[in-house]
Amino acid sequence: MSKSIPKSLGKKIKYYRKQRKLYQVELADIVDVSTGYIGAIEQGVKSPSLKLLSKIAKALKIQPHELLK
């Protein structure tokens, strides 16, 4: 996987999270992962599984493909 994909994915997750006025801790609670893991995804250090990506998209009230554009 290209290193730019996790970074751009993380930026999109952060963008939509802020649009929904959610803190990392709130998103983490909704999708049942640690706040640190959400932070690592947003920084492009970690890549979420497809299952987690789907949960994140649902929590952000968007379709998963919107995060992958």
Image: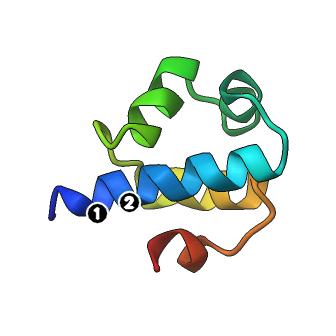
Q: Amino acid at mark 1?
A: Ile
| Horizontal arrangement in the rendering, residue 6 relative to residue 28 (left or right) | left
Give residue 56's mark.
none
Q: Position of residue 60 (x, y in %)?
A: 75, 55
Give residue 5's mark.
1
- Residue at 66% x, 60% y: name it: 57
| Horizontal arrangement in the rendering, residue 18 relative to residue 9 (left or right) | right
Please tell me in which quadrant of the rendered image residue 16 appears: bottom right
Along the line of sight, which residue is nearer the eye, 16 or 35? 16
Q: Give the crowd class for mark 1: few <14, some 14-19, many >=20 residues within 10 Å.
A: some
Q: Helix, strand, or loop for circle 2?
A: helix
Q: Position of residue 55 (x, y in %)?
A: 65, 53
Q: Are marks 1 and 2 in contact (CB under 8 Å)?
A: yes
- Residue at 46% x, 40% y: name it: 42
- Residue at 53% x, 50% y: name it: 52
Along the line of sight, which residue is nearer the eye, 26 or 52? 26
* Color style of the picture: rainbow
- Does residue 39 sit above or below 31 in this rendering? above
Q: Amino acid at mark 2?
A: Ser
Q: Helix, strand, or loop for circle 1?
A: helix
- Does residue 46 sit above or below 10 in this rendering? above
For the residues labelled 1 and 2, the Cα–Cα distance comes to 5 Å
* Label 2 sits on residue: 8
Along the line of sight, which residue is nearer the eye, 61 or 15? 15
Q: Give the crowd class for mark 2: few <14, some 14-19, many >=20 residues within 10 Å.
A: some
- Residue at 57% x, 28% y: name it: 33
Q: Position of residue 11 (x, y in %)?
A: 48, 52
